[in-house]
Image (tube, rainbow, N blue to C red):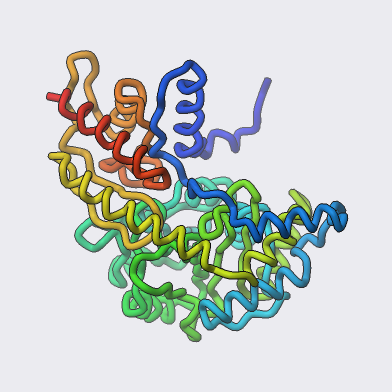
Amino acid sequence: MQLASRLSKFNEPETLKMAKLGRELRSQGIDITDLSLGEPDFDTPRHIKDAAIKAIEENFSHYTPVAGYLDLRQAICAKLKRDNDLDYTPEQIIVSTGAKQCIANVVLSVVDEGDEVIIPTPYWVSYSEMVKMAGGTVRFVHTSLENGYKITPEELESAITDKTRLFMFSSPCNPTGAIYSKTELSALVKVFEKHPGVLIMSDEIYEYINYTGGHVSIAEFESVKERVIVINGLSKGFAMTGWRLGYMAGPVELARACEKIQGQITSGTNAVTQRAAITALNGSLLPSQEMQAAFARRRKRVMELMKAIPGIDCNEPDGAFYVFPSVNKYFGKSDGEEIIQNADDLCMYFLNKAHVSTVTGKAFGAPDCIRISFANSLENIEKGFEKIRLALQKLH
């Protein structure tokens, strides 16, 4: 069968690939410790599940508006005002089947053939592939561990050209956990003010999983707010990954463009999920806060475990639930059977020999690193790190 040539322009997400390989080994009876998970290991809070059950009983089983129910978009506006002091109207909100669809809608709405999109590395795996699907060109800006994996104003300025259409970043960041402070964002805003044609996509899906005491959105800066597209959703902060609901907030013209694209692909998001989302956004944030506190405890333990492994450099994440260590000191070493040439090899070595799943940093634009998730129980985290430590001891 002859398939479309566009399939050769982008890759399968490594995060999904590792999850699939782990499931295959588990189906063979192998005890795989999953440290590749990109989702909270908590169940959805009871009051949100009850809202979904109520919606089913009230027959919310029909097509929904493409942009989302009006009262949900109103709830999103209220959330943005409550948590971020941002003023939006329902016309500026589009509800989608996950934040990933929101990002795809935005990229397809603003990127043409030949347009350039700036992405600081490390970055979430799908940003670059979506740009390629849209026919755009990615300009990566490689950040450093020394700078906390955050782009500097000077690096941003040097990357912008007359072809730059969009800047894409996340804070808190997947995979590094980096969070931009108000001071750091202010410095970037000064650069954007000189380039009014550049749009800014701010992925804030990990907003509630923050260990610094407060989230700051680049949309808070009035001088650029009309060019900012805020991406958020329920997956991480409310433990609702499988419910598939994300949302974007941005200029009305862009919201209408995203609605037009979505109308031809999925139409409106699941009705029951939308009703549950209203309860999630309007209800108590205590379950989210308790989940964040659990992640904070795990982060503390993970950093202790990380320090016990020689040859690994790792920053302490300010948000999200990953560590992103540099592992290149193990490249070129062997256990006597196979040579570890790169992070891909090391991840497969951990999977096949230690039975621990992780994700190669190459997928995130950082080939010297791997991503390890602590969205798992403390027991499994300790078990997985011990397997990793013993496996690394065998490399010489």
Q: Nearer the viewer, residue 288 or 69?
A: 288
Residue 108 in view (yes/no): no
Horizontal and vertical percent for residue 207? 47, 65
Residue ID at (28%, 30%): 346
Look at the image and tell me in which quarter the C terminus lies.
top left
Residue ID at (68%, 66%): 279
Question: Left or right of 274: which side holds 100?
Answer: left
Look at the image and tell me in which quarter the N terminus lies.
top right
How many circles with numbers are drawn on the protein? 0
Q: In the picture shown, does residue 292 fall above or below 84?
A: above
Q: In the picture shown, does residue 160 fall above or below 262?
A: below
Q: Residue furthest top?
A: 337
Horizontal and vertical percent for residue 65? 81, 62
Residue ID at (68%, 54%): 49
Question: Left or right of 266: which side holds 298?
Answer: left
Residue 176 in view (yes/no): yes
Residue ID at (61%, 66%): 248
Q: In the picture shown, does residue 331 fall above or below 37?
A: above
Horizontal and vertical percent for residue 61? 85, 52
Q: Nearer the viewer, residue 338 or 41?
A: 41
Horizontal and vertical percent for residue 39? 49, 47
Q: Residue furthest bottom?
A: 222
Question: Left or right of 212: which side holds 96?
Answer: right
Q: Nearer the viewer, residue 207 or 141?
A: 207
Q: Nearer the viewer, residue 355 or 338?
A: 355
Q: In the picture shown, does residue 381 fall above or below 43?
A: above
